[in-house]
Amino acid sequence: MNAVASFLYHLGIDSPRKWHPLLSVYYLTYACDFRCPHCSDGVGKPYYRLRSPTLSGSRVLDLLRIIRRHSEYLVITGGEPLQHPDFREVMEGLGRLNFRGVILTTNGVALDSLLPAVAPVVTELVVSLQTLDSERADAWYGLGMGTHRRVLANLEQAARHPGRKFEIVISSVVTPENIGDLYGVYHFAKQRGFRLAVCPQLVGVKAHASLAGSPAYRQFYDFLIAEKKRGGRVQGTVDYLEYMRDLRQFACRPFTMLVVSPVGEVFYPCLELGNFAGNLFNEPDLHRLRQAGCACFGPQPKCGTQCHSACALGFSRFFENPASVLHEAALWTRARFRSAL
């Protein structure tokens, strides 16, 4: 099923016995040398502490061929995906699988040497950046002095890459400690034509307790909303940003996504709950996997707590308020018109 048909399916049907993802997310490896204090899975464990084997490059491509049957858009993430020992081989083979869009998330520290492998394949390069203060960033990364400056230099190199076709997105996590720094990150992105994507720090599945009700947190999102309305390149619709600002409850739609572990295990119904419906190598039929997951763990729960992540909230609002997409298109058209003047 292509992306348009999947969208219409989720808008009008969404059978509990079927699984038609709009997007697939593959954790290439959980390995990461960074020690960012906000790093956390659904139970609060940093990804670098998660234990999973990594597949060889050829086996990764076998898995991605299965994933390609189910969705046209792919996110390669981690951990730090560039640390996979066969990363170049994966990128080379990925180009032959004809995904309509490939998003790569990275901390950016090894990007310089691997940029030639990334550039022909990736449509969106997402680089994590929480501050422009190198001393603070280096303390968070835990790799010593100069790490942050290398990330910034690699971002500039990526922006100047000959014949660049990929969009660069700066991904920032709002923590109680860095709210003031993120205004500078936004202007850094704006000056270079990058898009900014911002989400609150999650502790387990909930936003950090210090963010809820924080005037500084709310003011920062008000700033982003105002910039968005002026045509700023901020990820998400105004409706989405308002939900992030207010940390409002939303109707989650986890089956709009397929989330896969490094070895092919399929999360059911979502990454945050940590259950596996089965392995794509053993059962490549997603409909059967959803039914197996339901038999083992029950139907999709109605969560009392919310994980305000980009995908979870983004897809929720996409379907609950389709008109917001029209508003987004109007803002984009107005911004393009102004830039042309």
Image: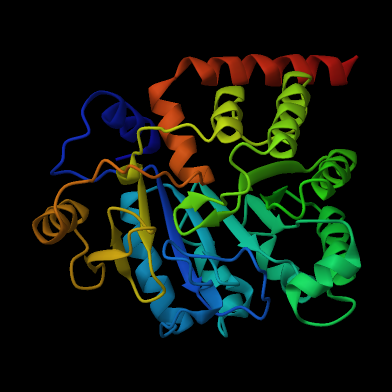
- Left or right side of 58 for 84: right
- On the image, the x and y values in percent for residue 320 come to 39, 23
Choose between 158 and 256: the one closer to the eye: 256
The answer to whether residue 99 is visible is no
x and y, in percent, of residue 165 in the image: 72, 48
Quadrant of residue 282 in the image? bottom left
Indicate whether 55 appears above or below 202: below
Image mark count: 0
Pick the front one: 81 or 225: 225
Question: Residue 91: x and y, percent?
Answer: 57, 69
Residue at 85% from the left image edge and 38% from the top image edge: 190
Query: Quadrant where the C terminus lies?
Result: top right
Is residue 116 shown above or below 10?
Answer: below
Q: Is residue 134 left or right of residue 253?
A: right
Which quarter of the picture shows residue 59?
bottom left
**Residue at screen point 89% across, 79% down:** 145
Q: Is residue 120 left or right of residue 189?
A: left
Task: Report x, y in % for residue 250.
Answer: 40, 32
- Relative to 3, is 12 above or below? above
Look at the picture and state if 51 lies above or below 211. Answer: below
Q: Is residue 56 visible?
A: yes
Apparent side of residue 304 relative to residue 16 in the rendered image (left or right): right
Residue at screen point 52% across, 73% down: 47
Colour convention: rainbow
| Quarter of the figure that contains the N terminus | top left
